[in-house]
Amino acid sequence: RATLGVLGGGQLGRMFVHAAQRLGYFTAVLEPDAQSPAGLVSHHHIQTSYDDPAGLAELAQLCQAITTEFENVPAQTLQTLAQTRPVAPGAAVVGIAQNRIEEKAHFTACADVSGVTCAPYAVIETDAQLQGVQRNRADLLPGILKTARMGYDGKGQVRVKTADELATAWTELGGVACVLEKMLPLTAECSVLVARGWDGQVVSFAPQRNVHVEGILAVTHAYEGNMPSALADRARDAAVAIAQHLNYVGVLCVEFFVVDDGTEHGGLVVNEMAPRPHNSGHYTIDACDASQFDLQVYAMAGLPLPQPRQHSPAIMLNLLGDVWFDASGQLQEPNWRSVLSLPGTHLHLYGKLQARPGRKMGHLTITGPDVASITTVARRAADLLGLPGLGDI
Ligand code: ATP
Ligand code: MG
Ligand code: MG
């Protein structure tokens, strides 16, 4: 019985499990939470912490190959598993993606081949470095101070305008290793999904354009014409170069900023990468002939990677827990019937038992024959659900 393993039990793991099961694989999820989205749908749920040697031994014993859906899985865990089983992505690349300091060093190291650089930044790990930046790097202000580790959905970030605010923010963040990044005039954001096999075969999706609200992904626009094609080509080539330079195996998502640099289409700046499928790629489930999760399964299983083809334009709306609360703060299930009566709507709910504001509970992908019709449906769905900040869809 071929079994594929995944570290982490969140929605990304759940969608990996679904894709694996479709190909006839059994799955094993290692996740401490008893009620996790992936654990609930997997054949095996090893309910223990990521550093429990007995749990890791059981996972390795069950599985043909192991991947991760949880970005912050300890590198040691991946190393331990890799002693006996193929693990992808590997400990070294996950370690780089987990630490903004190493991640930016990698982006800088391969800027010649990728053709993109990251935002101007400085590393702040010590008081002396803080003072040095306060004195000499006025060019980075206004900026964003980001913790090097464990940040996601805009958490662990403080926007700072002055050298004094920078010092306060660093203390607020606990004096841990950080990067100060220059605040850039963004005109858009996009991301690119790349899948690479053990044999170095690479396939990729066209870039999707992403809209964030309060640091969290709100909307993904996935269709031809979502951004100037010259920029889209550059982003796609850059993401492939970054994956190759890492000798990456599995699915990688690279996030980019589009900045106003006075040129016709704007400039492209690489933001960060996620060593796994990504929220901005969920539209691939309904709009492509192979999804990002299918590709993760193919890559894990050592199968040839199909070059995915998008068959429908798509818009994805993220459904955060906020949607589950009415105006008076009462918990209330959204009116799915009205949303699902709209044409081309694909509702994905992750089976999380508790809705909380800001918590990713599901997403709605809208597909249709053309961009005009999906835009109309997306606007209506957003209105029905009371989604904030979607005026520009
Ligand atoms: P994710 O959930 O994508 O992992 P994160 O918490 O790691 O997010 P970033 O991607 O670094 O955070 O930043 C979150 C958002 O904040 C970006 O998508 C962008 O909208 C904004 N942002 C971050 N850095 C900058 C910058 N240097 N200039 C302008 N806006 C920025
Ligand atoms: Mg991030
Ligand atoms: Mg991000």
Image (spheres, rainbow, N blue to C red):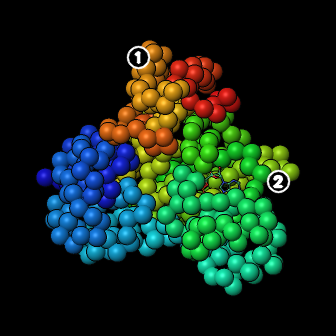
Indicate the quadrant where residue 37 lies: top left
Q: Residues within 10 Å of mark 1 (few under 14, many from 20)?
A: few
Q: Depth check: give the residue in front, 32 or 208.
A: 32
Three-letter amino acid code at disc 2? Asp
Instruction: Please say if 378 is above or below 213.
Output: above
**Residue 170 locus on image (x, y percent):** 64, 70
In the structure shown, which secondary structural element does the residue marked by tag 2 occupy?
A: loop
Kind of residue sitting beneath label 1: Arg
Q: Is residue 132 visible?
A: yes
Q: From the viewer's side, name the closer residue of 343 and 251.
A: 343
Residue 130, numbered label: none
Relative to residue 376, is residue 134 depicted above or below?
Answer: below
Disc 2 marks which residue?
A: 261
What residue would you read off at disc 1? 337
Among numbered discs 1 and 2, the one appearing first in the sequence: 2
Tell me residue 265's x, y (percent): 78, 45
Residue ID at (17%, 70%)? 54
* x 35%, y 40%: residue: 354
- In the image, taking residue 229 as reference, residue 194 lies left or right, namely left
Rounded to the nearest angstrom, the CA distance separating label 1 from label 2 is 45 Å
Residue at the image position 49 percent from the left and 35 percent from the top = 322
